[in-house]
Amino acid sequence: MRNISLGLAGSLLFFANVANAQPATPATDAEYIKLVTTAAPDEIVGDATIVRIEANGDVRTLKKGTSEFTCFLGNNVPMCSDPAAMEWAKAWQTHAPPPDKVGFIYMLNGDNGASNSDPWATKSEPSNH
């Protein structure tokens, strides 16, 4: 298992800081893959690249896929994103203008209560849910 390319790693780095503050992720790579694959339909997950964001921010490829989707735990939530969604997420996290394209993020296993009205909320409040 090797580190993935710098471009994708840069897009994923924003999840590393959030992931560090969350409960422990699955201990083994097999457990991690089992959890991550709950994010999207089999047709997406089966061909996706699966990466693991380590506590120090390093991103490891656990399974090289043949599609453009990348699946991982972000904020301890399983998700699979296409390249446009990764660009959007990076812009959101850095408060930069979003890309002018449509992206898809599968999160079929739910989330941890993220706000749907305040993208920079750090906790659930009556005003942001």
Image (cartoon, rainbow, N blue to C red):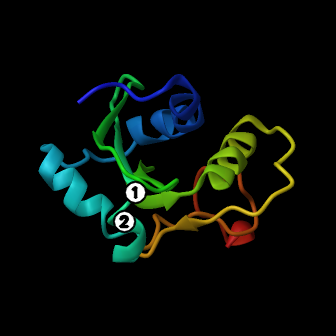
Residue marked by disc 1: 48
Q: Quadrant of the C terminus?
A: bottom right
Image coords of residue 37 (percent x, y) = 30, 64
Kindly indicate the quadrant of the structure image that contains residue 22: top left
Image coords of residue 99 (percent x, y) = 82, 49
Instruction: From the viewer's side, name the closer residue of 107 and 49.
Output: 49
Q: Which mark is residue 84?
A: none
On the picture, is 71 further left or further right than 96?
A: left
* Residue 9 visible in image: yes
Secondary element at tag 2: helix
* As drawn, 106 above or below 48: below
Residue marked by disc 2: 45
Is the residue under label 1 in contact with that under label 2 (CB below 8 Å)?
Answer: yes
* As drawn, 21 above or below 105: above
* Residue 109 visible in image: no
* As drawn, 102 above or below 32: below
Secondary element at tag 1: loop
Instruction: From the viewer's side, name the closer residue of 10 and 5.
Output: 5
Dot 2 surroundings within 10 Å: few (below 14), some, or many (20 or more)?
Answer: many
Image coords of residue 44 (percent x, y) = 42, 69
Going by the numbered disc 2, the residue's amino acid type is Val
Dot 1 surroundings within 10 Å: few (below 14), some, or many (20 or more)?
Answer: many
Q: Quadrant of the N terminus?
A: top left
Kindly indicate the quadrant of the structure image that contains residue 102: bottom right
